[in-house]
Amino acid sequence: MIPRYSRPDMVAIWSPESKFRIWYEIEAHACDAMANLGVIPRENAEAVWKAKDVEFDVARIDEIEAVTKHDVIAFLTHLAEHVGSDEARFVHQGMTSSDVLDTCFNVQLVRAADILIADIEGLLAALKRRALEHKTTLRVGRSHGIHAEPTTMGLTFARFYAEMDRNLTRMKTARDEVATGAISGAVGTFANIDPGVEEHVCTQLGLQPEPISTQVIPRDRHAAFFATLGVVASSIENIAIEVRHMQRTEVLEGAEFFSMGQKGSSAMPHKKNPVLTENLTGLARMVRSAVVPAMENVALWHERDISHSSVERMIGPDATITLDFALARLTGVIDKMLIFPENMLENMNKFPGLVMSQRVLLALTQAGVSREDAYAMVQRNALKVWEDRTDFKQELLADADVVAALGKDQIEEKFDMGYHTKHVDTIFKRVFGES
């Protein structure tokens, strides 16, 4: 992933140095377990730990791999250079490369998930704060992009909070599902290594032993993990699209913060563009692009092939680094987002009173008018407002049929905005709890 869309903590998880450190820990813990079982001498297991403070030389490992054409063997050769060839002769005893590669990959995914979980929690805090701040700030709800009925800005933020809260649960589930390790040897039968070694290594690395592996950990786990990243990315885009819509000149109900010295256009100095949320839409596409390859990795030949390997070397870092950046960026957008309540009311009144049409329709049916006739009565007045920009309430008050059915006082009463916000507290309790 390019530095422009990367944050250091997530990048560090995927660095060669971090990968080789995890490989080393897997091998060293495996040696400890084998020594405990009496399979290898204790002194050889202890000798491996002489490398615990070593900074593995990535260039040297690459140099060896250029000859061996095998990354794990290159690493083991380099490890022996630090530990001593005789002392290291029991390293990787009974293991296969996938034991190291797959277990390491899952450790990295778990660590990445921990960062993403913290990111989502930060976004949730920002969404909750803005929801409470604008709990009763009126704005028009839209369906098909057209004015529908009044809602509040707080409900918009609360809706996004609830969606992200579901994503938090999904992310924790995805983390748990991928938190397995396998040290089961060739084709996963434990023929040359005791299952106790796997249990020990997994315990040390914070994983659960894979109940049954072949020569690889089953990739349905990873498919579920990357699918979750895709869902989170789609939720990011869902929020970003709303912000982008609100910032349109003819809407301008909200906007990204525009900092001092910021420029919106190289050609038009007046421009304030929603560049952050547009960027988030693009980043969401990139995260989702990892989902289908992860799904396709589930089907491997027999006990193992490596068709998944090249895919995961790319989607592992790219998807997690991109999503980490996107979540942090969106949190900043929400934290600093500008809200324009006056514009919200002005937009709602562009077609005065029109958003109250359903109230009038329901009142007419309750007064004994058939639904078909009531709809026709309301619509003929609403269409005048659409075409002539007149006032909906005044049109109703001038309609003899409507006045005969409801009376003027009841028509007036149907234009109380408080009617549409009376259950906001109930919704907020559902989303945020009693607090």
Image (cartoon, rainbow, N blue to C red):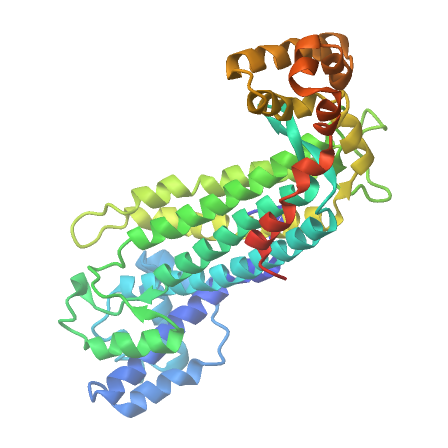
Along the line of sight, which residue is nearer the eye, 75 or 344? 344
| Count of numbered circles in the view | 0
Along the line of sight, which residue is nearer the eye, 165 or 111? 165
Q: Position of residue 79 (x, y in %)?
A: 38, 74
Residue 410 location, quadrant: top right
Q: Position of residue 50 (x, y in %)?
A: 42, 85
Residue 67 location, quadrant: bottom left
Task: Identify the image quadrant of the C terminus.
Answer: bottom right
Compared with residue 163, is residue 189 higher up or lower down, i.e. above or below?
Answer: below
Q: Residue at x 55, y 52 (%)?
A: 430
Along the line of sight, which residue is nearer the eye, 417 or 350? 417
* Residue 86 can be seen, yes or no: no
Compared with residue 62, is residue 369 higher up or lower down, i.e. above or below?
Answer: above
Q: Residue at x 35, y 88 (%)?
A: 46
Q: Position of residue 236 (x, y in %)?
A: 57, 43
* Residue 188 can be seen, yes or no: yes
With 203 as the anchor, is 21 left or right in this view? right
With 186 as the anchor, is 359 left or right in this view? right
Q: Residue at x 74, y 12 (%)?
A: 395
